Amino acid sequence: MSKLHLPCLRGNIGDWSYFSTVMKVKDIVENKRIIRVEESPELYSENINEMLQRWLKASRIRQIKNYILTHEERFFSSLIVAIHKGEPKWSDFDIERQFHIEGEELESEEVEFIENKLGVLTLTGDEEIFALDGQHRLEGIRKAFESNPELGDEELPLVFVVHNNDNKVRTRRLFTALNKYAQKPSKAELIILDEDDARAILTRRIISNHTGAKKLLW
């Protein structure tokens, strides 16, 4: 695979360093630059103590594919991907000390912070990068791109972390944290917020026109 230069923010949370960027759909999908765990002989394991991903659900993949192909207002949260092999390069932006925002000169400490966080992440093409959180979205994106290659120039948000295959427990713990503490909206909240489900929209109209009906949601 060819080199790919990505505009990037670098940050830290807990004992994890991460890189937040955007990639075009075609750069994600073509040549499988980003893979699923089961597509890597080295990463994949049927041993339940070493598995890095849950099993795929075909129905979920179809749902995501259809969403991408039929919604102009489509949007996704960031895919969390882990770098397994290769040596991606980080290059800081060199910002001049006389740096202004809206006419105001920034303090040197602020400039140093920006310089340390803002840069370019270069993927050499030798990496093995797998979806840690978002494998269903990845597969749905692949299927949608097959149906409509014009999606290739759309840009998706990604967060990169580094995986150490000698310490799978650390990566497994991160996967669990990303999913264990994420809470889906309740049925009542979906009725209040959903703008695509006809039943939710109709329910809101009924509630809006009947005093006291709001209590039925809670």
Image (cartoon, grey):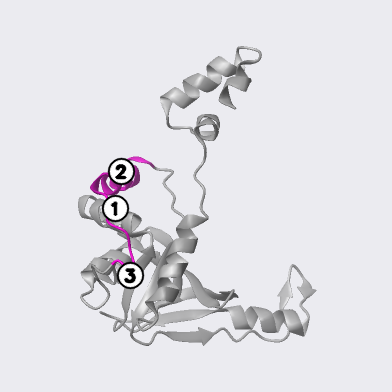
Residue 217 sits above or below residue 43 on the image: above
Q: CA distance from mark 3 to mark 2?
A: 30 Å
Residue position for label 1 = 140
The relative height of residue 144 versus residue 5 in the rendered view (above or below) is above
Q: Residues within 10 Å of mark 3 (few under 14, many from 20)?
A: few
Q: Position of residue 5 (x, y in %)?
A: 41, 78
Q: Earlier in the sequence, mark 3 or mark 2?
A: 3
Q: Residues within 10 Å of mark 1 (few under 14, many from 20)?
A: many
Of labels 1 and 2, earlier in sequence is 2
Q: Secondary structure at mark 1?
A: helix
Mark 3 vs mark 2: give the one in front. Answer: 3
Magenta span covers which residues?
A: 48-71
Residue toward you, 140 or 59: 59
Measure the C-alpha gap from mark 3 to mark 1.
27 Å
On-image quarter of the N terminus: bottom left
Nearer to the camera, 106 or 164: 164
Find residue 33 and report its horizontal and vertical position in percent: 28, 72
Q: Residue at x 73, y 75 (%)?
A: 100
Q: Are marks 1 and 2 in contact (CB under 8 Å)?
A: yes
| Mark seen at residue 49 | 3
Q: Are marks 3 and 2 in contact (CB under 8 Å)?
A: no
**Of residues 201 and 169, the one drawn nearer to the viewer in this rendering:** 169
Q: Amino acid at mark 3?
A: Asn
Query: Does the magenta segment cover residue 69?
Result: yes
Q: Secondary structure at mark 3?
A: loop
Name the amino acid type tagged 2: Gln
